[in-house]
Image: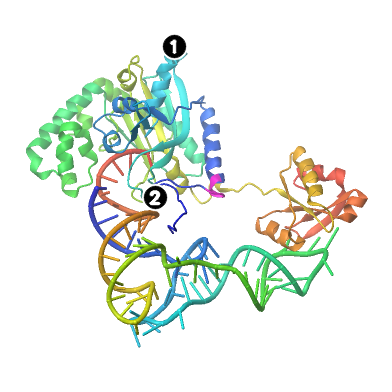
Amino acid sequence: MARGGRLRAVKGTRDLLPPETAVWAAVEATARRVFAGYGYDEIRTPELEDTELFVRGVGESTDIVGKEMYTFDDKKGRSVTLRPESTAPVVRAFLQHGLEHQPLPRRLYYIGPHFRYERPQKGRYRQFHQIGAELIGDAGPWSDVELLQMLLRFLGELGYRELVVLLNTVGDEESRAAYRERLRGYFEPLGDRLGEDSRRRLETNPLRILDTKVPAERELLAEAPRMADALNDASRAHFDGVRRGLERLGLEFRVEPRLVRGLDYYSHTVFEIVSSALGAQDAIVGGGRYDGLMRELGGPDLPAIGFAIGEDRLVEALPEDSPCRLPPPPPVVVLPVGEVEPLAALELAEELRAAGTAATAELGGRSMRAALKRADRDGVRWVVLLGDDELAAGTVTLRDLARGEQTTLPRAELAARLEGGA
RNA sequence: GUGAGCGUAGCUCAACAGGUAGAGCGCUUGACUGUGGCUCAAGUGGUUGGGGGUUCAAGUCCCCUCGCUCACCCCA
């Protein structure tokens, strides 16, 4: 509908309108409540960062840094980037403000827009929204378990059922290095059977070949060396601990030996949650441990683990019976009748608000019929009628649209009456 | 970056082989001058995404362009 003169939202971005905004707000409120229950505090970092943060933090070999970032020079020629993710920014802020000198571990969460320059499709937007959490400063498997416990509780409170965590480990640096060599050793002789992308990954990031979708390559994977066989003792112990903890707490998971993450900073535990309610972009949550990132960004050698939820996808796949879909009750409508000025309705509506009841006043210009029709269509239950009779008698007429009944009562009693749901 | 499908009223969609663009819903008003839901009536609605071409005639055919959608890729 590109009519000349009218502008539309930039490609890959979108407007959220009511009533959907209420669902988003409810989802975010649930996240804040649940996360607070686990001792998480909110952190807000800028949407604009030094480009170098992502080059170093996310990894030069990743698609995100290689071709998906909104990067530009500001007026002083500094290269800045709209954040494509928030783990690196959170770590940057953590270090910048010396939080490593405060008690550890530190639990932080964030909610906000992120940007990646990709071709939009279902569940994928250029401006998308993430709800994420980071647990910084604990290396043991129990922090992994606690984080997943919180994640599953959050999803459960949104009404999600029967979600399974896909779990894997990519080991520590030593194990990963050893595994990379085994993978290279296996795939290099098979180079001619690999696609262009996978041949390139053989050099830059062999682990990524594991999640290829090319059928011919997947066949080769069946015989490929397994990460599990390349783990050193420490990495194996960590993964065993995570699995034992999840089982003990009754949290469902499935080990996916080929699950890897696209960002360079992951180590040990990696996980993902997918939903069949989405299309090809079915990952609602991705996350994992990133023990090396802090040091990579110039800080101390502090371990950490986190997840990022795709809020857009989370809302799109939200179950029909999610409590977040319950619309808030519409306000009481105050209707001036006959010769009564709308100003009198504004006045009365404000009295109701002062008493804690949401109210809108009819601003005039339409018949009582039309105003009632509109209120009915909006799902309004209570209409307060304020006419000459009522004004003269110091009363109001309270109409219950659901029951089709109305009563006249002293104006002074109205607020109390509505407070209890009348 | 690559590929495919689709653009007609605010929304969902019609329009036979090219022949002057329609319905439902919505919105406004009235029947009902201080009373919604149901019903009935009237009204409001569009340079058929944009540009060019073929034709006596283009929503319909051809070309270009823009947009949307889905998929590849990648990931949340």
Residue that label 1 marks: A101
Give the camera-side residue of A311 and B19. Answer: B19
- Bin the neighbour count of mark 1 within 10 Å (Cα to Cα): few under 14, some 14-19, many 20 and up: few
Counting residues from the N terminus, which is met first, the one under dot 1 or under dot 2? 1
Residue B48 placement (x, y as % from top left): 42, 67
Q: Amino acid at mark 2?
A: Leu
Vertical relation: A74 (above or below) B2: above
Q: Tell me the residue at 45%/51% (across/down).
A: A8
Q: Quadrant of the N terminus of chain A?
A: bottom left
Q: Magenta residues, as a range?
A: A17-21
Task: Please check whether the numbered discs 1 and 2 fall on a single chain.
Answer: yes
Q: Amino acid at mark 1?
A: His
Q: Nearer the viewer, residue A258 or A71?
A: A71
Q: Disc 2 designates what residue?
A: A278
Residue A304 or residue A167, whichever sits in front: A304
Q: Is residue A408 left or right of residue A164?
A: right
Q: Position of residue A141 (x, y in %)?
A: 37, 24
In space, the residues marked 1 and 2 are separated at their CA atoms by: 42 Å
Looking at the image, can residue A320 be seen?
yes
